[in-house]
Image (cartoon, rainbow, N blue to C red):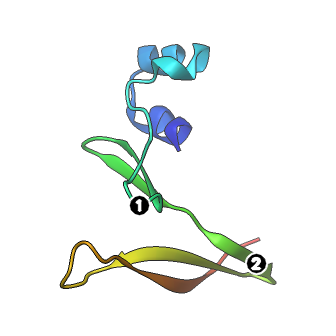
Amino acid sequence: MEQLYVDRFCSIRAQLVYKKSRKYALCPSTIDRYGLGVHCGHDPGFVGIYARKILLMGDVLEYEYRIVAVTDNPRHLVFETKRESLTVNL
């Protein structure tokens, strides 16, 4: 994800610094506090979600991911599992 961000939005100088060593990245990735998503960059920024049970059947890609549901009590978190499918061109 960092590599995509650097290639798309950073200057040539920043790209060279990143290629030399990831630890000097201008926009390092961070994992959100629930461990479900990854954030990289700022204005614009990338947000990624960890997918699981990834299956490619023909030209349909199916996967699951988890999100934190909104509840009345912020101390009691409820995780919802969502299923998605995408049609891909092979």
List the residue tagged with mark 2: 55
Compared to 37, does 23 lie above or below?
above
The residue closer to the viewer here, 43 or 59, is 43
> Secondary structure beneath disc 2?
strand
Residue shown at 77%/71% (left/top)?
A: 90
| Rendered residue at 64%/78% (across/down) | 63
Q: Quadrant of residue 33?
A: bottom left
Q: Residue furthest right?
A: 58
Residue behind mark 1? 34
**How far from the left and from the top, in percent, is residue 87?**
64, 81
Q: Residues within 10 Å of mark 1 (few under 14, many from 20)?
A: few
Outermost residue to the left:
72
Q: Nearer the viewer, mark 2 or mark 1?
A: 1
Q: Position of residue 19 (x, y in %)?
A: 59, 19
Task: Name the residue type under label 1.
Answer: Tyr
20 relative position to 26: left or right: right
